[in-house]
């Protein structure tokens, strides 16, 4: 963090030095550009110094979750897009996973908080055989009729 702060301080000193030089030489556009950077650089330096100052502070850790009984639905929750899509009913699940495709390993492993979010980010609805309206309804918890196979 200290190196980033030092780099910004160098840029700030350069802008503060060059602004009046450009103005004296009549290069008003360059002088105005340097002048505009000065407050932005000062703000960035201030933010990084605050962050650097709190990095060593230990925040309290949250209380551990109570253990769940075996078979309790709260025992397991999907956390990835693929995991959520696999909870869809038959027909919907296969279509969603097929639309997401094999080449979407990164997207499939991306975290999602709920099924609607997972459906929203899994693939481009408009380019799917079922279309935007179908997947929009699924993302809202509806189960529209499955389209006939093409």
Image (tube, rainbow, N blue to C red):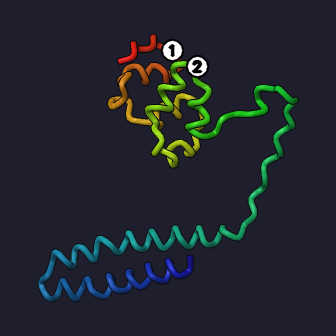
Q: Please, which residue is most extreme toward the top here?
A: 145
Say which residue appears at 22% left-offset and 88% top-offset. 21
Estimate the x, y position of residue 150 in percent, counting from the top left.
Answer: 35, 18
Q: Which mark is residue 143?
A: 1
Mark toward the start of the polypeptide (2 vs 1): 2
Mark 2: give few (<14), some (14-19) or many (20+) Cα within 10 Å.
few
> Disc number at residue 104?
none
Q: Secondary structure at mark 2?
A: loop
> Where is residue 51, by image quadrant?
bottom right
150 vs 35, nearest the viewer: 150
Query: Residue 75, relative to residue 47: is it above or below?
Result: above
Q: Is residue 139 left or right of residue 37?
A: right
Position in image of residue 67 (x %, y %)? 87, 37
Residue 98 pos. (x, y %): 47, 32
User: Do residues under tags 2 and 1 come within 8 Å of each other at their CB atoms?
Assistant: yes
In the image, taking residue 38 as reference, residue 67 lies left or right, namely right
Q: Quadrant of the N terminus?
A: bottom right
Residue 78, given in percent of the width and then of the height, sits at 66, 35
The answer to which quarter of the image holds residue 103 is: top left
Q: Whole-Å distance between the Cαs marked 2 and 1?
A: 9 Å
Q: Badge 2 is on which residue?
A: 89
> How many residues crowd mark 1 within 10 Å: few (<14), some (14–19), many (20+)?
some
At 52% from the left edge and 81% from the top edge, which residue is drawn? Answer: 3
């Amino acid at each position: 963090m200290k190196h980033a702060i030092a780099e910004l301080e160098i840029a700030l000193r350069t802008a503060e030095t060059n602004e009046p030089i450009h103005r004296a030489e009549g290069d008003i556009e360059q002088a105005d550009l340097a002048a505009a950077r000065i407050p932005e650089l000062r703000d960035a330096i201030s933010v990084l110094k605050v962050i650097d100052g709190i990095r060593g502070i230990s925040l309290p850790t949250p209380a551990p979750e109570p253990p769940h009984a075996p078979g309790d639905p709260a025992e397991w929750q999907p956390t990835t897009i693929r995991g959520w899509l696999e909870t869809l009913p038959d027909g919907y699940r296969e279509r969603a996973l097929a639309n997401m495709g094999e080449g979407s390993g990164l997207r499939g492993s991306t975290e999602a908080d709920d099924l609607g979010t997972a459906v929203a980010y899994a693939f481009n609805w408009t380019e799917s055989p079922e279309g935007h309206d179908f997947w929009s309804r699924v993302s809202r918890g509806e189960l529209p009729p499955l389209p006939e196979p093409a």
